[in-house]
């Protein structure tokens, strides 16, 4: 029995006992009092009447009259004169009046007062004994009324006390519950502090818990800060904080090769002209500040496109990779305009030029960069703030309606399959199979990877149906061979309010297979919908499925809230892993991140591991497992 | 027997009921001379001497007929106690003393004589129904003399019989018909109080006992051991 229920039981018992006792005593004493008073009245009347009768000198008529007058004018049930021989001489009797009180009450508690008796004589001669009994029904009525009154007053009091007790118990229960929730949250890697209750003992507990949680959170934050610092050292340009060349190239390569990323977009190169001249003229400090402000302007421009990647390629060159842009010109012109505003305001000789090209999934990186360089060179030839485009990419040929039709056709016809890439632990044992979904968009056509249809699925809001299909295929496959499988969940699905309930229903139907299902949300999308992720984690955990982040690492440490929603695992993005073996600073960063994530109980895996050297380096960093070309297909 | 004991343990209230039944069934015949003497000892030497004399007188007539007991008790109190008004004895206008209180003082008012004789006789086994405390108009000093309120004890050998009068004015035992100086007004005894309905009186703790002189006297007599 729960503590609170025990307290309640104790309170209720005490209240009931106290009130029953009070009630019993009150009713009993009232009854005693009434009975005594009636008995005295009987006795007094009998004595007085006997005295009157004794004065009648044995005159039977006179005595009858005296008895009748007393009986008729008073409230009597019985007045009886019995002779010395035991025979009744005179008797007046009235039927007992019915009481207004219920019969059971009269039966249980009705009054039975002592009848009054007295001796009647005529001189020395004995005439007999007189017995007088009064009506007691009015007293029964009084007692009944009294009992009802007492009961109602006590009931009101008991209710009031009960309400008070409820408040008091609440004062204990709420902080207790809060503390229990806090402790539970801690086991789920969430740090909650709760307000201190008024009850002193509970306040101590809460204070201690809060202190402990704060300390744990402090340690975690400290670790996160260290990791962030390591990340900056390894991947970022020291002056502007943007990705350095190596990291930027890694990210670009992942984007071009991603199975489930964007289908295409824009690469925009920006060159600040005559940086050395500027340096000479303005001095090192001013030039640095100008570079920082320019970087900020470029990031701001890129942010408008949503997901983005910005890097500093060398001293004066910056690059943006933008996904899913309609027009190539628009972002290029925007960034040029921003830089013009910035640099002109400083009234310097400095200027900038912009070159842009389209990229698409699967395009060779070197030729893309070469085209972008050429565009930039053409712009330089044209002078300050010139913008040059190379809009030769194939783009999205079909219209939105045609895409919706093709996607719906594939989903409705279940023309889909999961491809499988094993994820293994450091001993080579398979942890689960990563299963990106491929759709057969045309009947009898090819199975097409997500990168080609995902942007359109997003735009046509079909991701939730597609993700459900993937989960269903995965569950069916698990039912078939018992192997754990991971599927992607797109951020668009999270925003569909029917998605999580549907997924839950699906998992309930596959209750035995659900623990084998791993659900992955891209870090980027999860960050934008932390609350939705939290809700999904709660729902999925209740079914036994796992939830984690994929393509993670870049913004892990800024995601303070995200790591506390109770996730199970994190997959580090391929750009973190690429060439790790040769770079000490990045190894440090990855090792720090793994330590931090392990600290809050998450499993950490690496994506896209291509070389066995990197795999070895990852093992020294403490990773739990990896996937990628280095792992032989199952 | 064993069951009865267990039952008694289980229900404490039953014990009182049993006690009551015993009291009623043994009636008033059960008296204990030792208890009377002990109670008297607590009241001082004079009371003790009086009680010892009373014990002697009672024991001598214990096994004799009621007539002899009447004579002996009437004589004992008429000789032992001196007549005084309550105001002189107790400092109160009217005070109903128990037998031992009267013996302690050695003095008594008319109702104190009657009370003492009543309880002594019931202690010896005379039934209550044969005894009456009687309020009388007493004419003192022959016909046409001073009329004053008085109280005597009357003994009825049977319900219709001419009663004997135990009086302190005319000390020898006479039939009522031979007492033209007395005219009875009202009479009472403890009879009603002893029968089943008399719980208030017998319980000994009822509030009525403090309110009525007669019941007060009954209670005191019981404490003094004249009956249980």
Image (cartoon, coloured by chain):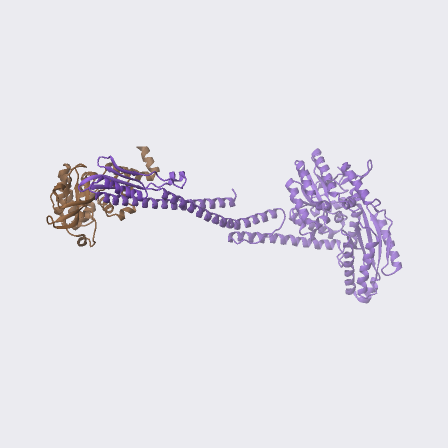
Chain colours: A purple, B brown
Instruction: Please say if A285 is above or below B222.
Output: below
Residue B4: give x, y in percent of width and height.
Answer: 32, 34
Instruction: Depth check: give the residue in front, A7 or A425.
Output: A7
Residue B105: give x, y in percent of width and height.
Answer: 17, 51
Judge whether residue A221 can be spotted in this image: yes
The quarter in which the C terminus of chain A is drawn is top right
> Quadrant of the rendered structure where residue A311 is?
bottom right
- Compared across the picture, whether A438 is left or right of A59 comes to right
Residue B226: give x, y in percent of width and height.
Answer: 21, 42
- Residue drawn at x 71%, y 33% as measured from the top left: A480
- Residue drawn at x 32%, y 46% as measured from the top left: A37
Judge whether residue A567 can be spotted in this image: no
Instruction: Please say if A357 is above or below A87.
Output: below
Instruction: Depth check: give the residue in front, B18 or A229.
Output: B18
Residue A188: give x, y in percent of width and height.
Answer: 62, 46
- Compared across the picture, whether A41 is left or right of A626 comes to left
Instruction: Depth check: give the residue in front, B153 or A495.
Output: B153
Number of dots carrying numbers: 0
């Amino acid at each position: 029995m729960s503590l609170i229920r025990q307290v309640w039981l104790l309170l209720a018992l005490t209240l009931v006992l106290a009130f029953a006792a009070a009630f019993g005593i009150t009713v009993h004493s009232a009854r005693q009092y009434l009975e005594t008073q009636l008995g005295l009245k009987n006795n007094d009347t009998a004595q007085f009447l006997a005295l009157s009768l004794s004065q009648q000198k044995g005159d039977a008529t006179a005595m009858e009259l005296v008895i009748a007058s007393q009986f008729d004018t008073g409230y009597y049930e019985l007045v009886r004169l019995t002779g010395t021989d035991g025979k009744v001489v005179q008797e007046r009797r009235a039927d007992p009046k019915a009481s207004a009180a219920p019969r059971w009450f009269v039966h249980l508690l009705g009054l039975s007062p002592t009848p009054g008796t007295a001796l009647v004589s005529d001189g020395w001669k004995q005439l007999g004994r007189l017995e007088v009994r009064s009506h007691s029904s009015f007293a029964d009525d009084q007692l009944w009324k009294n009992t009802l009154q007492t009961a109602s007053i006590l009931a009101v009091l008991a209710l009031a006390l009960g309400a008070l007790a409820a408040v008091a118990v609440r004062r204990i229960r709420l902080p207790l519950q809060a503390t229990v929730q806090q402790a539970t949250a801690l086991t789920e890697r969430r740090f909650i502090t709760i307000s201190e209750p008024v009850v002193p003992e509970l306040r101590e507990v809460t204070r201690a818990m809060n202190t402990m949680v704060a300390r744990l959170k402090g340690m975690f934050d400290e670790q996160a800060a260290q990791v962030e610092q390591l990340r900056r050292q390894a991947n970022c340009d020291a002056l502007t904080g943007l990705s350095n060349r190596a990291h930027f190239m890694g990210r670009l390569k992942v984007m071009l090769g991603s199975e489930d990323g964007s289908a295409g977009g824009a690469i925009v190169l920006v060159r600040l002209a005559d940086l050395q001249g500027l340096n000479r003229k303005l001095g090192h400090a001013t030039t640095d500040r100008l570079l920082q402000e320019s970087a900020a302007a470029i990031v701001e421009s890129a942010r408008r496109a949503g997901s983005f990647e910005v890097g500093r390629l060398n001293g004066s060159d910056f690059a943006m990779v933008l996904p899913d842009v309609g027009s190539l010109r628009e972002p290029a012109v925007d960034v040029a305009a921003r830089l013009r505003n910035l640099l002109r305001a400083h009234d310097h000789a400095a200027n900038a030029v912009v070159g842009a090209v389209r990229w698409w999934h699967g395009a060779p990186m070197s030729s893309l960069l070469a085209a972008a360089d050429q565009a930039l060179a053409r712009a330089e030839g044209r002078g300050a703030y010139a913008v040059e485009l190379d809009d030769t990419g194939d783009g999205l040929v079909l219209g939105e309606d045609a895409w919706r039709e093709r996607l719906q056709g594939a989903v409705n016809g279940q023309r889909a399959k999961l491809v499988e890439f094993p994820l293994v632990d450091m001993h080579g044992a398979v942890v689960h199979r990563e299963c990106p979904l491929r759709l057969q968009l045309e009947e009898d056509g090819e199975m097409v990877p997500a990168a080609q249809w995902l942007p359109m699925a997003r735009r046509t809001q079909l991701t939730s149906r597609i993700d459900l299909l993937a989960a269903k295929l995965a569950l069916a496959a698990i039912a078939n061979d018992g192997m754990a499988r991971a599927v992607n969940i797109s951020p668009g699905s999270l925003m569909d309010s029917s998605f999580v309930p549907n997924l839950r229903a699906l998992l309930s139907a596959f209750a035995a297979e659900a623990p084998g299902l791993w659900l992955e949300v891209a870090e980027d999308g999860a960050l934008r919908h932390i609350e939705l992720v939290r809700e999904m984690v709660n729902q999925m955990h209740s079914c036994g499925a796992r939830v984690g982040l994929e393509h993670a690492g870049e913004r892990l440490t800024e995601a303070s809230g995200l790591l506390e929603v109770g996730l199970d695992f994190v997959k580090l993005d391929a750009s973190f892993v690429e060439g790790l073996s040769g770079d000490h600073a990045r190894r440090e960063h990855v090792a720090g991140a793994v330590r931090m994530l392990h600290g809050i109980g998450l499993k950490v895996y690496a994506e896209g591991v291509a070389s066995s050297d990197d795999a070895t380096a990852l093992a020294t960093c403490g990773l739990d497992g990896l996937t990628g070309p280095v792992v032989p297909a199952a | 027997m064993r069951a009865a004991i267990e039952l008694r343990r289980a229900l404490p209230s039953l014990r009182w009921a049993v006690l009551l039944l015993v009291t009623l069934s043994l009636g008033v015949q059960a008296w204990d001379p030792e208890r009377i003497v002990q109670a008297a000892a607590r009241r001082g030497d004079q009371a003790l001497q009086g009680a010892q004399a009373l014990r002697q007188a009672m024991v001598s007539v214990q096994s004799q007929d009621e007539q002899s007991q009447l004579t002996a008790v009437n004589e004992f109190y008429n000789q032992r106690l001196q007549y005084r008004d309550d105001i002189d004895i107790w400092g109160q206008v009217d005070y109903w003393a128990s037998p031992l209180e009267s013996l302690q003082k050695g003095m008594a008012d008319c109702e104190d004589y009657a009370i003492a004789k009543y309880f002594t006789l019931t202690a010896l086994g005379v039934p209550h129904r044969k005894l009456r405390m009687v309020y009388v108009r007493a004419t003192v000093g022959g016909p046409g003399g001073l009329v004053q309120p008085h109280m005597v004890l009357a003994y009825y050998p049977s319900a219709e019989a001419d009663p004997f009068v135990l009086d302190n004015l005319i000390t020898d035992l006479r039939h009522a018909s031979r007492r033209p100086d007395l005219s009875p007004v009202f009479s009472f005894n403890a009879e009603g109080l002893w029968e089943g309905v008399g719980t208030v009186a017998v319980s000994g703790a009822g509030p009525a006992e403090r309110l009525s002189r007669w019941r007060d006297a009954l209670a005191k007599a019981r404490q003094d051991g004249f009956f249980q």
